[in-house]
Amino acid sequence: MPIRLGIVGSATGPYVRELVRAAEEMGARVHQLAFPELSASIGLVDNGQLNNARVLNAQPNGIQRATAQAAFLRTESERIEGLDAVIVRTMPLGSLEQVIFRMDCLQVLQSQGTVVVNSPKCLETSIDKWLTLHRLAECGLPVPPTIACQTRDAALEAFEVLGRDVLVKPLFGGEGRGIIRLSDPDLAWRTLSTLSQLGHVLYLQQYIANFGYDIRVLVIGDQLLSIRREAQPGSYRSNISMGGIATPHELSHFERDLAIRAASAVGGDVVGVDLMPARDGQTFILEVNAVPGWRGVASSLSVDVATQIVSYVASKSR
């Protein structure tokens, strides 16, 4: 029987369109979902009456209490029930309340037996660069020396501790956006002062002397697809969105082990793991992305990544 698949993301996004195409080619019934449209109910049906609830004895004040046994989601146009699986392709910016509630919505789906890829736990970890690195380090995996703090003075001290050559990264975000390399003390003072005044967490990572490329490993369950991303001359960012050049890469046994362990550390099913071979012979894990792009992987390896993802998710839901 064809699966019912929900895809959370922008309907106009290229990766969502690829997933919809792949799912429809497999005969799946696809529901496109957007986080801002989701709401959740407990113990109620559309007409507002109690459903699947047990009404207890009346209390002294005459108020009856109901213990709900069912929860469900709706969008602005339909009630969402019976989904076999959901693929999350976005985590839009929002208030703290909105972000937490969106995770709650995914928890509702998961509690009903829907396969959620990636899981709320994985998303909560991986959208936060600091928490991701902490989980990796807890598992004994190699990560660059990193300091996160909240004041300019603490950040300037971190700048010194990390050798006066650091990457300052936004705690949330991807595709290399917002990363600044600082090696001049005066520029560091001005930059860190501004970020502190704007209320940002100051996330400083030691710059790793490298060969001008990193390795992106796209993990889809037990399958690993890998490319080398070479930075443009004079750039320290190798992201494809920043002009990085992608070529096929054959993983060593050591690199495969790092990628598999990194995905496991964040509880990810479909993740992008970024490895950085350093000039001193070490290999570091830079980050794990729970909503990975695959443009470079698909073009370099001539692979239909969307079909592989949908097939994997379908296999988990059976």
Image (cartoon, helix red, strand yellow):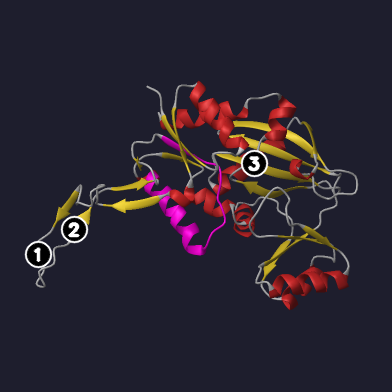
Check disc 2 and report its element: helix, strand or loop: strand
Does residue 288 sit above or below 18 in this rendering? below
Q: Quadrant of the N terminus?
A: top left
Residue kind at label 3, given as amino acid type = Gly
Q: Residue furthest right?
A: 233
Q: CA distance from mark 2 to mark 3?
A: 44 Å
Q: Is residue 58 left or right of residue 271?
A: left
Within 10 Å of the Cα at label 3, are there few (<14), some (14-19), or many (20+) other Cα atoms? Answer: many
Q: Find out whether the residues at labels 1 and 2 contact each other: C-beta distance under 8 Å.
A: no
Q: Amino acid at mark 2?
A: Ala
Q: Give whichever of discs 1 and 3 has the lower sequence position.
A: 1
Residue 58, label in figure: 1
SS for callout 3: strand
Q: Residue at x 72, y 34 (%)?
A: 296
**Please, what is the three-letter code of the amino acid marked with disc 1?**
Ala
- Is 94 magenta? The answer is yes
Please give the residue where the numbered disc 3 appears in the rendered image. Answer: 272
First to last magenta residue range: 85-109
Q: To which residue does mark 2 refer?
A: 66
Q: Nearer the viewer, mark 2 or mark 3?
A: 2
In this picture, is 9 found above or below 249?
below
Label 1 – label 2 distance at C-alpha: 10 Å
Which one is nearer the viewer's eye here, 145 or 315?
315
Q: Are the residues flagged by discs 2 and 3 in contact, CB closer than 8 Å?
A: no
Of residue 77 and residue 22, the one placed in the foreground of this image is 77
